[in-house]
Amino acid sequence: MSNWPSWLPLSERLRPLSPYGAPQLPAQAVLNTNENPFPLSGNLAKAIASRIEGVARNLNRYPDRDAVKLREGLASFINSLSSTSITSDNVWAANGSNEIIQSLFLAFGDKGAIGFTPSYSMHPLIARVTNTEWVDGRRREDFSLDIALAKEEILKCTPSLTFITTPNNPTGSSVTISEIEELAKVVPGLLVVDEAYAEFSDEISATTLIEKYPHIVVIRTMSKAFSFAGARLGYLIADKSVIDALFLVRLPYHLSAITQAAAEVALEFRSELLGNVATLVSNREKVKGELIALGLSVVPSKANFLLFSGFDIPAPVLWKSLLDAGVLIRDVGLSGYLRVTIGNEAENALFINSIKAIITKQD
Ligand SMILES: Cc1ncc(COP(=O)(O)O)c(C=O)c1O
């Protein structure tokens, strides 16, 4: 938006921006924001409601400012995934990982940040909002990360924050743990590994490197594999000194007692909540095969979505035709590509049947 009223003292750096806006449109199959399609069970919903009822009596008081119990639960979850021995001192929690990202820029953004595009669009956007200089690093044509080139670009701009998203959004591509270690050896400042989709991938988590490389910071979220996007809970695993620094920029009582209670219950039900990850991974491969059978190209993905190309019509036209057929997917602004989140069986079938009908009609 550029026609702000002249009397509005809006910061110059914000004037050219538009608010984040994945369309929230009604559709039969909502496959545009990489959510988990499986709703919470009745049992879990009841357990959350009952825990919140307990908390509700104390809503006259501020919540635990440091969310210690929740951070302990998150530490124990992370330790159960790989051979780490982190404690609550190594964990920070916030309202979605977007808030975590904002806190990182506020605390550590002085010397700027670099990420490798195409990647998660909110990294540069939150950088801009927090007045952090952002550098767009490059990927190979096939969207994989060229580690040698990445190192060169990092050393050229010497930022205080280097972002690696793995699996990467919107491409689904991932980097190996040895590639992360290679980067850690040269990165100045902090190496931020955004692992929002890690549960869908078989790569080893960068949390396993933090003890050896205390400047590695790992971002995770309950919004994807945990089926908990509506609760807004993101977290970060890092050396204690990183967490201590985040205390300087967090707002007092930023995480409500209700959010903390709901997330604690979700962690207790983690095997149930994460129970659908294997189904989503196998359905990802099934949908990928079906798109390829239609003559389309699909970027190899280790996340819960696929980036595909090879259609003859402009991406926005295909996006709109799919929406007309009841399927909402994502135009990520990459010419010739669209991204689809893996849904439940019925949603995936509707997507494949609709795209087949649209593409066939064009031929
Ligand atoms: C790579 C990546 N990081 C972070 C987020 C933010 O997730 P949330 O704020 O819901 O935790 C997303 C959401 O799509 C994402 O794709």
Image (cartoon, grey):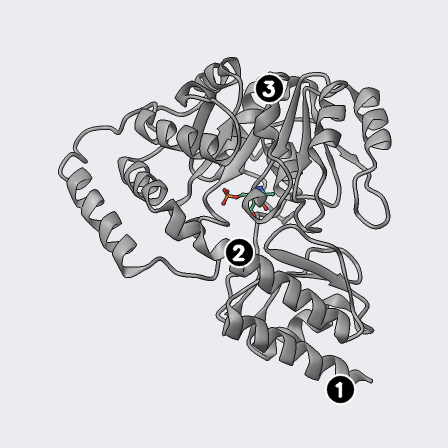
Q: Given this view, does label 2 or label 1 mark the residue nearer the observer? A: 2
Residue 108, numbered circle: 3
Q: Are marks 1 and 3 in contact (CB under 8 Å)?
A: no
x and y percent of residue 313 in the render? 80, 73
Residue 9 occupies which quadrant of the picture? top right
Label 3 secondary element: helix
Residue 261 occupies which quadrant of the picture? top left
Q: Tell me if residue 114 can be seen.
A: no
Side of 125 relative to 175 (left or right):
left
Label 1 secondary element: helix
Label 3, ligand 1: CB separation under 8 Å? no
For the point 65% across and 68% down, the residue is: 287
Residue 362 occupies which quadrant of the picture? bottom right
Q: Nearer the viewer, residue 13 or 260?
A: 260
Q: Which amino acid is tagged 3?
A: Phe
Residue to which mark 1 is pinned: 361
Q: Residues within 10 Å of mark 1 (few under 14, many from 20)?
A: few
